[in-house]
Image: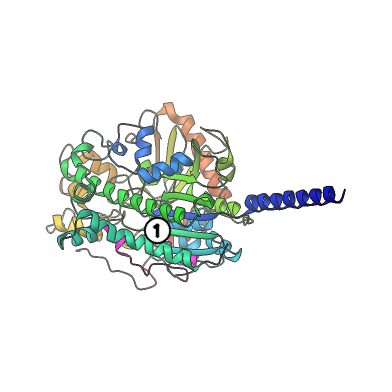
C-alpha cells in the first residue's frame, strides 16, 4: 500500500512537472528578428515563381524564399509612405505617417517622444533590444524611436552598408570575390553576436537589422561582377515604365545585386540563430522600406513600384507554408510584434495586428476586412520645389484598382526641373552623381541620367513625361488590364462609379484617422516647419541656378 502511494505521488509529481514545462513553453515570449532593407521593394525570386515573366525572374533570394516557404508570404504588403523617414515613423509607431507630427517628412524630421514605439514598449516589458545600422533616419534624434543610438550594435563594422563599393575595393587589393564578401559578412555576424552576448540568460530579444546597401550608390557593373546577374537577362522583362536599354538594364541588375547581398546577410543571421539554439523561438520578419531609388515610378511614388514591398514572416505561433492575399501596410507590424510578445497594444496605434492572419491555416484572403492599403507622401527633399514645399499625395490600393489624389497638381511630383532648358544644363556626370541638380526627389543614378539626357527622344519622352511631368488631380488605374499603371482612367465614364467609391473610402479613412492634409486645406503640412527652409543645419542643395 505504501509502495503504491509513493508510486502515485511520484507519477503526479512528474505529470505536474511536465505540465508546467509545457505551459512554460507555450507562454514563453518569442524573440523577434526584423530584417529591414533600405529601398527594397517587391523584388525577390519567390515572387517571380508566383508571377513569372518580370524582373523577379532574374534576382535570386534563396534565404528570403526559404523563410517565406517555412512561414507566411504576403502578396499585398505596402509601405504607408514611399520615403525613408515617414515610412519608418509609421512602422515604429503603428500609426499612419500623417499622425506622427514632424516624423511625417524626410529632411527636417523631429521625433515626438510622446508617441509610443514598439521597440521601447518591448524594452519596458523586459525584452533585450538592439539595432544595427539604419532604423529611423534622417531625423532628430537619430533612431529616436529605438533609443537614439543607446541600443546600437555595430562595432564589428559598417562597411556592409556600401557592399558593392567595399567588395570592389577589396578585390582591387587582390582578394577573391568570395573572400571579399566574407570580410563584409563577418561584420554582420560580429554585430549580431555582440547583441546576443549582451542579453541576460533566458531573456527574450528584439533585434533590428537595417543595412543601407540597397540604397544608392552602387558600383556600375557590380551586379554581374559580384553576383553573376547578366543585365541582358532582363531584356524583354522590364515593366513598361522602364526603358529597355542597356544602361537601364545594367543599373537594375546592380540594384538586384545589392538585394542579393542583403539576402546573404539574412542567411547569416538565421544561421546564427540556429547556432545559438534560438531559431525555433524567434519570430523572423523581413521586408523593405519602399521601392527602388532613381527609377521611374519607384521611390517617392505611390505606384506599385514605389509602395509594394516584399514581406515574409516565420516563427513560433505562425502557421507556415502559406501565401496570403490580405492587404497590409507595414505599420501593422508594430501591434503584431507587441501581441506576439504578450503586450497590450496602445489605443493610439491605428494599425491592425497581423497575428490572426499568421495563426490562421487559410490561404488567399484570410481576413475579409483586409482588402485595401492606404498610402501617401508629403515632403521628401526640402529644396525639391521653390518655397520648400511638399508634393502631397494620398492613395488607396485594392486588388483591382489604385486611386491616387494629388492635392497640389500644379507642383512637380519629382521636384522642379532645375537647370533644364537653360544654357548650362546638368552634365551626364552630375545627373549620375548629384541628386539635387534637377528633380531632387528622384535619386541620382544612371537611369535618371539616361531619362533626362534622352527626354526628347520619341521612345523615351512618354516615360519621361509620365515620371517627371505634372500629374492630374486624380489618378485611377485598372490593375487587371494595366498592371504597370500607365493609363489613367479617372476621366473615363466607364470608371466613374469606381472612382466615386474609392474616393469616398479613401477620404473617410483620412478623416477618421485625423490626417492634417484634409483639415484646414492642409495648413499643417503647408507651413513651417513642415514646409519652408530647414530649421537646423542640413546638406546644402548642390545645383546650379
Instruction: Give the left or right position of residue 315, taking residue 7 as reference.
Output: left
Residue 359 picture quarter: top right
Instruction: Tell me which residue sits at (28%, 36%) in the image.
Output: 239
Of residues 527 and 57, which is closer to you in this image? 57
Q: Residue 182: give x, y in percent of width and height.
A: 28, 58
State whether residue 264 is above or below residue 188.
Answer: above
State whether residue 462 is above or below residue 27.
Answer: above
Residue 435 picture quarter: bottom left
Q: Residue 355: give x, y in percent of width and height.
A: 58, 45
Residue 248 picture quarter: top left
Q: Residue 187: give x, y in percent of width and height.
A: 34, 63
State whether residue 298 is above or below residue 215.
Answer: above
Residue 75 shows in this picture: no
Instruction: Give the left or right position of residue 127, taking residue 41 as reference.
Output: right
Region in magenta: 140-163
Query: Which color scheme does this rendered protein use?
Result: rainbow
Of residues 374 and 146, which is closer to you in this image? 146
Instruction: Tell me which residue sits at (43%, 51%) in the image.
Output: 81
Instruction: Give the left or right position of residue 13, taking residue 538 as reference.
Output: right
Provide the residue designation for mark 1.
Answer: 210
Q: Residue 492: give x, y in percent of width and height.
A: 39, 29
Crowding at label 1, few (<14), some or many (≥20) Cα neighbours within 10 Å? many
Instruction: Tell me which residue sits at (59%, 66%) in the image.
Output: 124
Amino acid at each position: 500500500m505504501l509502495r503504491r502511494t509513493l508510486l502515485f505521488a511520484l507519477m503526479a509529481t512528474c505529470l505536474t512537472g511536465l505540465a508546467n514545462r509545457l505551459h512554460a513553453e507555450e507562454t514563453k515570449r518569442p524573440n523577434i528578428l526584423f530584417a529591414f532593407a533600405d529601398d527594397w521593394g517587391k523584388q525577390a525570386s519567390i515572387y517571380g515563381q508566383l508571377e513569372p515573366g518580370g524582373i523577379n525572374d532574374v534576382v535570386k533570394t534563396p534565404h528570403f524564399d526559404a523563410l517565406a516557404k517555412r512561414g507566411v508570404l504576403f502578396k499585398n504588403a505596402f509601405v504607408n509612405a514611399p520615403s525613408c523617414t515617414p515610412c519608418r515613423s509609421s512602422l515604429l509607431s503603428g500609426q499612419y505617417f500623417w499622425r506622427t507630427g514632424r516624423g511625417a517628412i524626410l529632411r527636417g524630421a523631429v521625433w515626438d517622444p510622446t508617441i509610443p514605439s514598439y521597440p521601447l514598449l518591448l524594452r519596458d516589458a523586459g525584452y533585450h533590444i538592439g539595432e544595427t545600422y539604419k532604423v529611423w533616419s534622417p531625423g532628430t534624434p537619430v533612431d529616436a524611436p529605438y533609443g537614439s543610438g543607446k541600443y546600437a550594435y555595430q562595432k564589428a563594422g559598417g562597411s556592409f552598408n556600401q557592399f558593392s563599393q567595399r567588395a570592389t575595393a577589396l578585390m582591387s587589393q587582390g582578394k577573391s570575390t568570395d573572400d571579399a564578401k566574407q570580410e563584409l559578412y563577418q561584420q554582420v555576424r560580429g554585430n549580431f553576436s555582440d547583441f546576443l552576448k549582451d542579453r541576460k540568460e533566458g531573456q527574450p530579444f528584439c533585434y533590428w537589422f537595417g543595412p543601407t546597401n540597397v540604397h544608392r550608390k552602387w558600383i556600375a557593373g557590380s551586379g554581374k561582377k559580384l553576383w553573376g546577374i547578366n543585365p541582358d537577362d532582363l531584356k524583354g522583362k522590364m515593366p513598361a515604365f522602364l526603358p529597355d536599354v542597356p544602361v537601364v538594364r545594367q543599373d537594375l541588375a546592380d540594384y538586384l545585386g545589392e538585394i542579393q547581398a542583403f539576402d546573404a546577410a539574412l542567411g547569416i543571421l538565421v544561421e546564427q540563430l540556429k547556432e545559438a539554439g534560438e531559431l525555433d523561438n524567434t519570430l523572423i520578419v523581413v521586408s523593405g522600406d519602399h521601392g527602388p531609388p532613381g527609377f521611374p515610378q519607384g521611390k517617392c511614388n505611390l505606384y506599385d513600384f514605389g509602395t509594394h514591398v516584399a514581406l515574409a514572416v516565420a516563427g513560433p505561433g505562425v502557421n507556415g507554408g502559406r501565401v496570403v492575399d490580405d492587404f497590409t501596410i507595414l505599420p501593422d507590424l508594430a501591434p503584431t510584434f507587441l501581441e506576439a510578445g504578450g503586450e497590450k497594444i496602445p489605443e493610439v496605434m491605428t494599425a491592425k495586428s497581423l497575428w490572426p492572419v499568421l495563426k490562421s491555416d487559410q490561404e488567399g484572403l484570410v481576413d475579409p476586412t483586409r482588402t485595401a492599403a492606404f498610402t501617401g507622401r508629403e515632403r521628401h527633399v526640402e529644396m525639391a520645389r521653390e518655397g520648400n514645399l511638399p508634393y502631397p499625395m494620398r492613395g488607396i490600393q485594392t486588388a483591382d484598382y489604385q486611386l491616387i489624389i494629388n492635392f497640389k497638381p500644379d507642383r512637380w511630383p519629382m521636384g522642379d526641373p532645375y537647370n533644364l532648358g537653360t544654357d548650362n544644363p546638368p552634365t551626364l556626370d552630375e545627373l549620375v552623381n548629384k541628386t539635387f541638380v534637377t528633380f531632387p526627389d528622384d535619386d541620382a543614378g544612371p537611369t535618371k541620367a539616361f531619362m533626362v539626357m534622352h527626354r526628347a527622344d520619341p521612345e523615351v519622352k512618354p516615360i519621361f513625361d509620365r515620371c517627371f511631368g505634372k500629374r492630374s488631380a486624380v489618378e485611377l488605374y485598372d490593375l487587371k488590364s494595366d498592371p504597370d499603371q500607365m493609363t489613367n482612367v479617372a476621366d473615363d465614364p466607364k470608371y466613374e462609379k469606381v472612382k466615386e467609391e474609392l474616393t469616398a473610402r479613401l477620404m473617410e479613412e483620412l478623416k477618421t484617422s485625423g490626417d492634417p492634409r484634409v483639415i484646414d486645406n492642409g495648413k499643417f503640412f503647408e507651413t513651417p516647419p513642415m514646409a519652408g527652409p530647414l530649421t537646423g543645419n542640413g546638406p546644402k542643395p548642390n545645383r546650379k541656378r
